Amino acid sequence: MNKLFDLRFVIGLFFLIIGLLLLGYAFLSDATEYKMKVNLYCGLLFSSFGLVMFMLKQKNKEDA
């Protein structure tokens, strides 16, 4: 339960889930090439931001 009080964990989880959904939609949908690129790039950006938030949480955990 203590994990949920750390905002970096919640934000990282949210962006990682949204990013993975966008990546899945980019590859599985019958969208035009433009829509696929937008979903692909946004999915990669959101996923990487989510992973950065998780890494910041882990870095703080090791320092404490």
Image: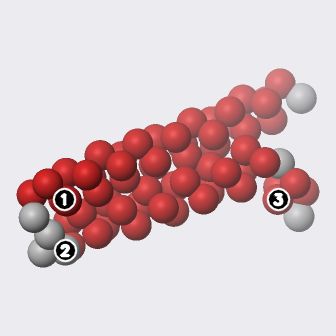
The residue shown at (62%, 49%) is 12
The residue shown at (9%, 57%) is 33
Where residue 36 appears, as percent x and y from the top left, is 18, 59
Where residue 47 appears, as percent x and y from the top left, is 45, 48
In the image, is 38 to the left or to the right of 64?
left
Question: The residue under label 1 is which amino acid type?
Answer: Met
Calculate the distance from the C-alpha at mark 3 to the C-alpha at mark 1.
33 Å
Depicted 11 relative to depicted 56: above or below: below
Which of disc 2 and disc 3 is earlier in sequence?
3
Q: Which mark identifies residue 29?
A: 2
Question: The residue under label 3 is which amino acid type?
Answer: Leu
The residue shown at (48%, 61%) is 18
Mark 3 near mark 1, Cβ–Cβ under 8 Å? Answer: no
Mark 1 near mark 2, Cβ–Cβ under 8 Å? Answer: yes
As helix, strand or loop, the secondary structure at mark 3 comes to helix
Where residue 52 appears, as percent x and y from the top left, is 57, 36
Which of disc 1 and disc 3 is earlier in sequence?
3
Calculate the distance from the C-alpha at mark 1 to the C-alpha at mark 2.
8 Å
Which of disc 2 and disc 1 is earlier in sequence?
2
